[in-house]
Image (spheres, coloured by chain):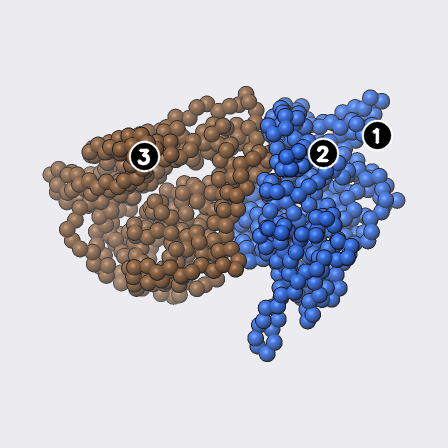
Chain colours: A brown, B blue
Amino acid sequence: MTSPIRRQLALAGLVTLAVSLNVQRGETHKPITSKYTYNEDVFPVLRERCGRCHVPGGVAPMSLMTYGDAFPWGESIRAEIIAGHMPPWHAEPGPVRFRNAPTLTAAEMDRMLVWVSGGSPQGNPQNVPPPVLLHHDWPMGRPDLVLPLPEVTMSPDASETVREFTIPTRTTRPIWVRSADLLPGTPSIVRNATISVKTDTTDDPGRLRPEELLAIWVPGDDPVDAQDGGFRLPVSADLVVRIHYRKTYSYEGREMTDRSNVGLYLSESPLNEIQRLTLTSPPVAVTDTPVSFERTLTEELRVLAFRPDQSLTNARLHVTTVSAAGERTSVIQLSVRPDWTRRYWFDRPLLLPQGTRVEVLAVLNGADTLLPPAGSPLPPQFVDGSPVRVMLDVVRNR
Amino acid sequence: MAVRLALVLCAAVGVVLGSISTSVSARQQGQPADIDLPPMSWTCPMNGVALPDGTMHADVYEAEKGNCPICNMALVAVRLDTIWTCPVHAVVAEKHAGACPIDRRALVPMTVAVSWTCAGRPEIDRTTPGSCPDGSATVVKYTPRPHGNHNPQHGGQFFMAPDNWHHLEGALSQPRLVRIYVYDNYTKPLTRDRMRPVEGRVITNAAAAGVTRERSVPLVLSSDGRYLEARVDGLTLPASLVAKVRLKADGPEHHFDFTFTGLSEEPPPPQASSAPVQTPTTPVQIPTTPAPVPTGVPARIDVPIPDTVDEIVAQIVERNRRIGELIDRGRLTDVWLPAFEAKELALAMGAHAAEMPTYKRTSLEPAIQRLLRAAWLLDGFGDLGNLAQVVAAYGDFRAAVSGIESFAQVPR
């Protein structure tokens, strides 16, 4: 294992420890040393970066849109920011940029940390910010095709459920999809979702194949217009929509219903079809050893996005490309956290010539628990012998 | 003479401190815009005092004036600021780092309450500067705060205990003689009675004939009750050792990493003076439960920002070097300062980035973010004295600095 990944992994453990330390410190008011105040400095950041979920009626368990809402969560805010858990992006900043990164700038991050560490002052009472309402609309505007989903009811005693729907598109010709999105009917309980094209073909990880996963939806995430490619849906294709519902404590014991909609953004003209390139590790039986695997490209490809397999949780991944000349480029380092698996769209497609080697280093159970407190090493955990899989969404060069 | 000079400097610095401007705090507290003061908290005068039922009054800080929710006493206003003072002679209050005029050691940062008083009228204690009854100007006064002083008092290495109240210093007073001093939350030495239940051991790893063996030597209370002591035969410099210390009979055993590159140098004895820094009058007792503390809350980091990106990068690299040196010397409690100074410098460089081409900005921002998070981690872990945690956080800090350096090397 290279030392940078070791450092990253160690840091992942450290931030976890930081989280636990902070949690232990309680919520008592601290002496005010912060030059930043909620009304003037912190609220604008919270509204812009967190207001999609941390708002009354949002999916987050608490609103942060008033001083009274945010103040008790100061230590949690601090721990989550330092740990890189919130905003929920989970990829380390690096040389490759991404299109849908809901991250804080360094200055915003510091402003939040100084505020929560320095007594969380409210600021001028004359500047109390106006109420923030839940934004509930299609972020990319009205889709070209809206497909309603059946109503789902969660009984009062249910706290979590997963539902899968197959819905017909009833299209009379093949269509090209630039982007797919989900508009929850009841945002407070829709935790995450996937939208796929139903297919009968079995996966052959050794070959490129059309990507059938149109979207991974997580709260607060804007859909991405693929731009350099698109998904081809055959005539009268069916979509498979899988939604994970979960109540926060605010809704425990209440019956909740949801009727979400799927939206498709179409292209009139054919697009370069997005293909999936799968990288698969050997079977993994124990979690305490990093797993490395690779694949060498047999043709030139443009990589639009990266995603870990949906089944992977609580893992740490580092993807590197190595050119035929031996030049290494760190593509992405991320923690895969439960319920936050997403697709990472590159800001600009990565052009990988034939012969490029794509290397993956994976540490299972490594997102948060690698470095325990001194003197108590983690025991190895045994898993079911499944391989680790990650996917690149690519288009062939035309 | 030196002391007198220091007192004059202190008063002068106080005026400067009182006039340093951050418009936010002035706005927040409704102060006139041309006088900027540190932000104000309201705190209970009974914080840390034993209550009749035998429990300890928890620390209470509020954002507004009012009564204590525990004892109903009126809360008192306090403004916190950072000064630079001599490590063990707290009679100097400087705005910036420098040398102690008494023993020429490097000044160390201390968090203090800043207030204003009048000569010969100690009952006057105000949170804003102004005039005295005789028409003269008020003079600034600094009062130590809990956790305001994390500086070694015996030339050793100083850590905060995980109970967030005790502090501990390890010193290599003579070859092979390890001493452990234990302090309260004001960095006052524990009394002999309170030292009595403290026990511990020193652990070293000795290599012989290619085999490393762990050795544990018990710490024994000195005859005067001032410190614990262990004689570790075979200890050679540089020496790395672990102190495992139990602060209460039924408490957990805490882990502290020490690295000694030389013998700890005991500072010269303090000199009598009419020091403006006052010792707390509140009785200090050991709480039965850990009190929440403002760890990692430096009052203000005031680092001069150079004009050019190259100079800023050089300053960041220098702070990085200083952190490495502090870690090598085992001074883990001190790493927060260069880490936070580097953070301020990096953020200032981010402001310069607005004038830069996009490709430079996009290279810079991830490195600044990484440095910032690593700086907060170093701050959090440095106090606790666990070397492995600090070293891991420093690894990320160093990587971030390398990223910033490589950015600076991009041709303009």
**Element class at badge 2:** strand
Q: CA distance from mark 3 to mark 2?
A: 50 Å
Q: Amino acid at mark 3?
A: Ile
Q: Residues within 10 Å of mark 3 (few under 14, many from 20)?
A: many
- Where's residue A192, x and y in %? 31, 40
Residue B286 lies left or right of residue A304; in this view the side is right
Residue under circle 1?
A: B119
Up/down of A240 relative to A156, above or below: below
**Element class at badge 1:** loop
Q: CA distance from mark 3 to mark 1?
A: 65 Å
Residue B93 seen by the camera: yes
Residue B198 lies left or right of residue A206; in this view the side is right
Select label 3 or label 2 by which is in front. 3
Q: Amino acid at mark 1?
A: Ala
Residue under circle 3?
A: A189
**Element class at badge 3:** loop
Residue under circle 2?
A: B114
Residue B402 seen by the camera: no
- Where's residue A14, x and y in %? 50, 52
Tags 2 and 1 on a common chain:
yes
- Where's residue A395, x and y in %? 26, 52
Image point 53% across, 23% down: which residue?
A127
- Where's residue A241, x and y in %? 22, 41
Q: Amino acid at mark 2?
A: Val
Image point 45% across, 29% down: which residue?
A65
Q: Nearer the viewer, residue B376 or A250?
A: A250
